[in-house]
Image (cartoon, grey):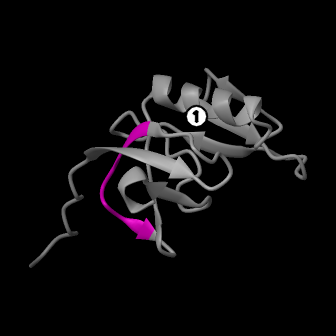
Amino acid sequence: MSGPAPAKRLVAAKFTIDSCPNVVFDGSWRTEYWNGWACPGFTFDQAMTVCETMTRLKTISRFEHDRESDQFLIWDFDDDEPLAFERDEDGLYWIGAWYWIWETAEEQ
């Protein structure tokens, strides 16, 4: 009898996103891809840096961290409802993973 496959270990890496050219973010991942794009996770401080940078560069409209639900809420310019990214069991927020066009800095 076999159980679920064990989760891949987290690997620290640097990431870029198409909407913030020439900006590199620190994060972690399990070397998994979605539609050919990297799926990074971020600590709280790293997620704050990502969201603050994206807001400053006008890539997103605004963001907030909801302490009660421990989620980052991110508003796009065209959406009334925010995208919600909650903290996982490893303490990471998967900001834009499986949604945005992330690459590892080495892939650029």
Q: Magenta span has 88? A: no
Q: Main secondary structure of the magenta part?
A: strand
Is residue 70 something that shows in the picture?
A: no
Across and down, in percent, residue 100 comes to 62, 58
In the picture as drawn, the residue positioned furthest to the bottom comes out as 1
Q: Magenta span has 31? A: yes
* Quadrant hosting residue 67: top right
| On-image quarter of the C terminus | bottom left
Vertical side of 8 occupied by 49: above or below: above
Across and down, in percent, residue 12 comes to 28, 42
Query: Over which residues does the magenta segment extend?
Result: 26-33
Name the amino acid type tagged 1: Val
Across and down, in percent, residue 84 comes to 66, 44
* Quadrant hosting residue 91: top left
* Residue at image coords 90%, 52%: 78
* Quadrant hosting residue 3: bottom left
Name the residue carrying label 1: 50
Element type where label 1 sits in the image? helix
